[in-house]
Image: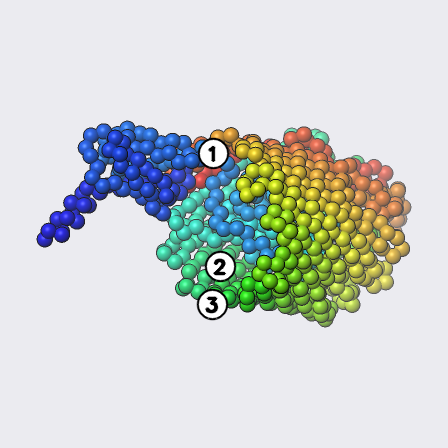
Amino acid sequence: MSWILVLLFSALSFSQGILLEKGTRKPLKDVSVFLLPAKLKAVTDPKGAFGFESVPEGQCTIIINLSGYNKYERNLKCADAVKQTVYLEKKFYTGFETTVTGKVNKRDDQAQSLTQEEFIKAPGSFGGDPVRAAQNLPGVASQGGSAQIIVQGASPDDTGYVVNGHRVPLVFHFGGLSSVIIPEAVERVDLLPSGYGPEYSRAIGGIIGLTTKAPKDDRIHGMAYVDLLNAGGLIEGPIDDKSSFLVAGRYSYIGQVLKAVAEENDDFELTAAPTYYDFTSMYKRKINDKNDFKTTLIASKDELELVVNKPINDDPSLRGDFYNRTEFFRIIPQLTTQLDGRHRMDNSIALGRDNLLVNVAGKYLDINSTVISQRSELVSEWKPTYKTYVGLDNQWSDTKVGLNLPAQNNIGGVGTPFSVGEERKFETQVAQTQLGAYLRQEIKTSEDSKWTYLPNLRVDHFTVNTETHLQPRFQLRYQWDPTLLLRGSWGKYVQSPQPQESSSDYGNRKVRSPYAFHYTTGFTKDFRQGTNQGFEFTNNYFYKELKDLVYPDIKKRYANSGTGTIYGAEIQTKYRKNEWSGQLVYTYLKSTRHIPGFGTRPSETDQNHNLNLIGAYNKERWTFSARFRFVTGLPYTPVNGSTYDSDNDVYIPNAGRIYSQRFDAFNQLDIRIDRKYIFETWILTAYVDIQNIMNQANSQNIQYSYDYTESDKVRGLPILPTFGVKGEF
């Protein structure tokens, strides 16, 4: 009986409180809590709980003084002081309150990765968008208002896009304003430019990849925002002690905004007006000690119409139906199995559909695909000096194509009028298989060796042209000291022809797969001396040989008649000093193509200079950030008059020297201001984001009058301010 009384007395005399970070409700562990004048001290546990024994009566002062947080001091009754939930306020709430655990698993030295913590605070990223933030990386450019991305001067069709390792048709919505997944659902974005490893293929330019995060499992979290261009929200949290979920969605009404602007502005002549939405959901479950399961659903839809308020020269053909819709979805279940201490197996599949509809004044292209892809990888650490990655990367697709488009020979980007080309109208169904297998090896001669050798191999088979390609790749790294890494790589890269190029109805079934050889070298130097203050410097050099490029051909429709070269250098400097941070990112490159009959010319993506200057300043609840971007204008082919075709009653353009002129250089200044309001259990952020604050009329295309006697350059988005609020709990 006596031991029961002892336990009861202890429970009555022991009081417990909880210490949480204000706004985020994150438990603060290992924090000292003092109770005066009783001279009592407690230390919080991993859940933020703290307690005192033998609390006296009367008035007490509870004191918490933690580095990086405002001092907490409050007088109240002793009994109340130790039973309350204490919300400790941070001195700085920089960026959005996102917790990222662990470091990026950067197995590939050529990869450049941004974690959620980095891209969600990046200036010029339009609210923390991961793909827009990736455009701040060396060698990355966008093609005007397109959803396609240019990597190191390659064609946009030479860039591959993946989500959780599986190919998707795009990662950018129309207009390049945001990625197809809401930023808070993305763990990291990866750029794999020249010389990347064997895990990926089918992209001779490079790879842009998104990896979705694991849903949080500590409590229910939520986020919602609304601004002038779009609105979205996310909720995530635990289902039980082994599983968690995430659901997120977003809708953009920027098209309606631009239409309203066009109606009020006579000078607003031609602008792409996109509308899009995306949806993401995730489920994660810890099956047992060895197996983890995660499934991801992503869905995206874009619609694009051209706002034509004042057609050039009142050409009636510009009043037709200009419509483009792109939509897709993927369901991606993933199973990770820790076989033993040395071996791990990753398996995943992706099931989905892609749809593309382009309608230009009654002429159309309608593509519907059912897609299944599969990836498996066995990671084995045989000993500290030898590690292997053996994997499969396969994809099957069944595509139905409806087409009513005339054949056009548009080398140089100048196409003939629709009514002149040979009419091609058909429906067809095509099944295609792409099989891939790879071996990655990491070899060191000894555990303390500074050299690491990576002899890698990739094999791809394409049923569309019954070709099998062996692709050796080699990477080398030398860790000069803990602050200096030297690296180099060489490899072969192959991609299958585009569907229209290999189509028996529209193209040439005998067209071969284009391929490239990549050569890279570079280094990274960290001057921070073990702190997060100071400089980091990266310098890379690259060279690419492009072979068997596919171009239109009069006799064969398409032929492997082109070659090309791309070479350049990249510099990236990062600096951080207390509240200040900044980056200078610069790429110089030359991208040329040799086309039979036209000689060697700049490619359509030859942007010699690409400069990004990025800066941010954080002051208590305020964040000020800006990005200035300067990019050499894209080349274009001029039109030197026209010839009248009386049979078809149209004017046929006379193309000048292909890609002999350039648009004016692209330059744009973006600024963003965030102000946080911290409440006990949630955070409110008000923000102003202004894209192109100088209202630069950056030219992206040329629109000609019907007889080609007049022309006008089509500009990109004008100054685009948006005001919004975001709440998080």
Q: In the image, what residue occupies the spot 49% across and 47% down?
A: 100
Q: For mark 2, what is the residue?
A: 295
Count neighbours of disc 3 (C-alpha within 10 A) and say few if under 14, some if 14 to 19, many if 20 or more. Answer: few
Toward the viewer: 367 or 348?
348
Q: In the image, what residue occupies the spot 61% across and 44% down?
A: 526
> Residue 359: percent from the left, percent from the top?
69, 51
**Mark-to-mark CA distance, 2 and 1:** 35 Å
Instruction: Specify the amino acid type for callout 2.
Output: Thr
Asked which quadrant contains residue 608, the reply is top right
Residue 230 visible in image: no
Q: Earlier in the sequence, mark 2 or mark 1?
A: 1
> Residue 11: percent from the left, percent from the top?
19, 45
Q: Quadrant of the C terminus?
A: top left
Residue 92 is tagged as 1
Count the marks: how many?
3
**Tag 2, which secondary structure?**
strand
Count neighbours of disc 1 (C-alpha within 10 A) and say few if under 14, some if 14 to 19, many if 20 or more. Answer: some
> Residue 404: percent from the left, percent from the top?
73, 57
Instruction: Specify the amino acid type for callout 1.
Output: Phe
**Mark-to-mark CA distance, 1 and 3:** 43 Å
In-image side of 350 versus 727 (left or right): right
Q: For mark 3, what is the residue?
A: 340
Q: In the image, what residue occupies the spot 86% across and 62% down?
A: 555
User: Of discs 2 and 1, which sits in the foreground?
Assistant: 1
> Residue 647: percent from the left, percent from the top?
87, 51
**Tag 1, which secondary structure?**
loop
